[in-house]
Image (tube, rainbow, N blue to C red):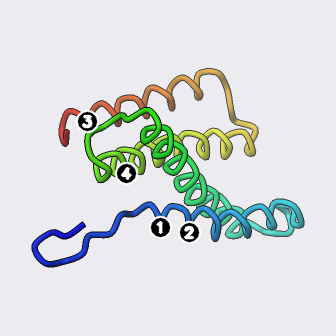
């Protein structure tokens, strides 16, 4: 794509690279270390790494599905919506995982965080179409 003399690149390679580079260490940490060995900062870092990895994973899956189903107009729009929705889904999953690891998860938390994610999506969609 050319736009005003500059080459425009998509963010899809970034999603794929992020998925591979963030997923491998995250799974290795999960397989070989316990939360007690990681400590407080390590567990927090692991949740941040998991959030970033899941953002890439869900964004990539949504982009492939939207491309296959021919949803959204342009490639740029599909990628933008997929990244945003992937981030929202990843934040919901990681939040529920964090609550579950603290043994604080209840049905109300699942419903409330789900409603919060839906409200954020509606606000962003109505604010910035």
Q: Which residue is mark 3?
A: 125
Q: Residue at x 46, y 46 (%)?
A: 63
In this rendering, which labeled residue sits more in front, label 3 or label 2? 2
Q: Which mark is residue 79?
A: 4
Cα–Cα gap, marks 1 and 3: 24 Å
Residue 52 location, x and y as percent? 55, 60
Q: Which residue is mark 2?
A: 17
Marks 2 and 1 close (CB-CB < 8 Å): yes
**Residue 94 against residue 40 in the figure, above or below:** above
Marks 2 and 4 close (CB-CB < 8 Å): no
Q: Tag 4's secondary structure?
A: helix
Q: Quadrant of residue 50?
A: bottom right
How many residues crowd around disc 2 within 10 Å: few (fewer than 14), some, or many (20 or more)? few
In this rendering, which labeled residue sits more in front, label 1 or label 3? 1
**Residue found at the very far left of the displayed protein:** 4
Q: Which residue is mark 1?
A: 14
């Amino acid at each position: 794509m050319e736009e005003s003399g500059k080459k425009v690149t998509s963010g899809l390679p970034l999603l794929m690279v992020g998925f591979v580079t963030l997923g491998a260490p995250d799974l290795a940490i999960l397989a070989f270390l316990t939360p007690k060995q990681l400590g407080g900062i390590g567990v927090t870092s692991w949740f941040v790494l998991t959030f970033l990895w899941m953002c890439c994973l869900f964004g990539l899956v949504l982009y492939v599905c939207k491309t296959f189903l021919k949803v959204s107009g342009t490639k740029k729009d599909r990628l933008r919506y997929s990244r945003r929705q992937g981030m929202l889904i990843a934040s919901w999953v990681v939040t529920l995982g964090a609550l579950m690891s603290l043994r604080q998860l209840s049905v109300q938390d699942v419903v409330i965080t789900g409603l919060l994610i839906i409200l954020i999506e509606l606000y962003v969609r109505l604010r910035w179409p």
